[in-house]
Image (tube, rainbow, N blue to C red):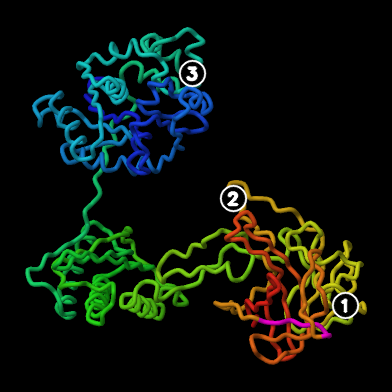
Amino acid sequence: MEAGVRTLLIWCPDWPVVAAEIVDGVPGEAPVVVMAGNRVLACSEAARREGVRRGLRRREAQSRCPQVIVVEHDPGRDARAFEPVVAAIEEVVAGIEVIRPGACAVAARGPARYFGGEEAAAERIVEQVAQACAVECQVGIADGVFAAGIAARTGIVVGAGRAREFLSSVPVSALEKPDLTDLLDRLGVKTLGEFAALPASDVLTRFGFEGALAHRLASGSDHRPLAVRQPPLDLAVEEVYDDALERVDVAAFAGRALAEQLHERLAAHGLACTRLGIEAVTGDGQELYRVWRHDGMLTSAAIAERVRWQLDGWLTGARRGAMSGPTAGLVRLRLIPDGVMVHVGLQPGLWGETGEERERAHRAFSRVQGLLGPDSVVTMVLGGGRSADDQVRLVPWGDEREPARAAAEHREPIPGVVTEPLLGKVASVTPLRPIHVVGMSDNSEMSGMRRGGEGSGGQHGGAGSVGPHGDAGSGGRDGKVGSGFAVVAVGPGKGRRGVKGKPVLPPWPGRFPRPSPAIVLPEPLPAVVRDGEGRTVGVSARLELTGEPVSLAIERGRPCAITGWAGPWPVDERWWAPEEARRRARFQMTTEDGRALMLSLARGEWLVEAIYD
């Protein structure tokens, strides 16, 4: 964009500080600094009075003002807080381009003609922002965005054709390109006027493309036109009713008509709805809102169906005395397309991924949610954790299936090593259950077994360990490997390496080895494990059992003989938080009646936590 195009730029001083005050409640009148990369990005007026400036290190800023409030920079917070300011400006002018959070620009010609001059337009915008958002701002008007931004710092209007003259005395640091400005300063070029006086061809040769663009800015020109911000489309449909809707059939009929209007409006813009928001207001002012998700595109009939289900749930629930139902008839209904996509068609899955069976199930589950609430139908998502009871997260049907805690894929009992079955090498092994028993290194958090050749099975009830060369170690007090478990050899594996560009997920050291149990009990069942002499089995500080597990009694049931077991796998979680700390030893056990269980021992009490299939 060549010189001569008038630009009006709105600038909110110290916007990172103002955003922290709006979003996080930081007192703006106090000394506040926003830090980015251990340097001051922005500071409040009170901090500047104490000598704090942009670019200072954290320690220097705190030494100048010991009582300063330090806030970490959050670009998302700045953008969210600036959106209401942009919306307020759009109420009086159109065609706004957001430069960055805290600054936006608009072509000055339209507002100047509408309000009777550039100064009058600037005053109207400042007044609008102050009244709507309670935010102070300054306006600069000049030829080009760059010159207007410099003018906004002092709130002046630069005459037409005088941008280069106005910029001539501005330091080169205003370009906000540290590497370039440092080089220019060492070459003796101190101001934008001196930089603009250099031949453009020589600047391109010496400083490259970035220097050529900066040279255009210093000369009062911009390298691109304004990219105006398009206001978001208002696709929601709404209807107000004189007679309150209290019957389900009447409300469903009104909802169908509104659903058809929404579908037609979306189709006119070439869009389809994937997430629908249903909002209702009762006669006494109560507001109800529910979001319906869909993995495909909602047709007019599908939108109407979900509206009917939701209204049926609200009104019927109210008559049944539900807490979340409306307290009066509905007087306003609004449908909001919360998620839209370009309508390019949807290919059904070959095996029914998006076929009729899945659709019928989805409708059934969604209707139950509409009647009983979103938490009435949930699905399980596996995530990170060290035990079976903390790896599962329940999410409502239709919500995004994201784990609460990330974790690497659980492939082997020990991350980074490969297991090899040794069933053919150990003649005395009779595998009854696919439970892996592995020898752990002494420094592992999951360690509960000694290395092969040391008779570890004698301390751990027949759990055969393996030696460093893959040879099977002894098992059981008499040197035999206990039955009921698959013995595996732990060979030298390659270390974990993250793929370039992809974060390495946490491995959760101490996680219980595979296979995972089929059923995790909501409440662990108390149990008692006894040795051959009838004493309760315990675990010492050296992770050695006080006796051989012989029988298991669950709750008040009869004792059952133990045919095989493995463990212990100790874990000491959140020891730094006494209220949340949990220290226990975990075991796998099989009984003579064919059950395979996961048990834990904590503070002398045995608990059955999960059941294997």
Check if residue 268 falls in the magenta segment.
no
Q: Quadrant of residue 13?
A: top left
Residue shown at the point (21%, 59%) measured from the top left? 236
Check if residue 531 falls in the magenta segment.
yes
Determine which residue is flagged by label 1: 476
> Where does residue 249 sit, x and y in percent of width and height?
17, 81
Secondary structure found at label 1: loop
Within 10 angstroms of label 1, few (less than 14), some, or many (20 or more) residues?
Answer: many
Would residue 578 be found to the left or right of residue 217 on screen?
right
- Comes first in the chain, label 1 or label 3: 3
Region rendered in magenta: 527-533
> Where does residue 522 sit, x and y in percent of width and height?
54, 77
- Comes first in the chain, label 1 or label 2: 1
Q: Which residue type carries mark 1? A: Gly
Who is closer to the viewer here, 381 or 326? 326
Would residue 612 be found to the left or right of residue 291 on screen?
right
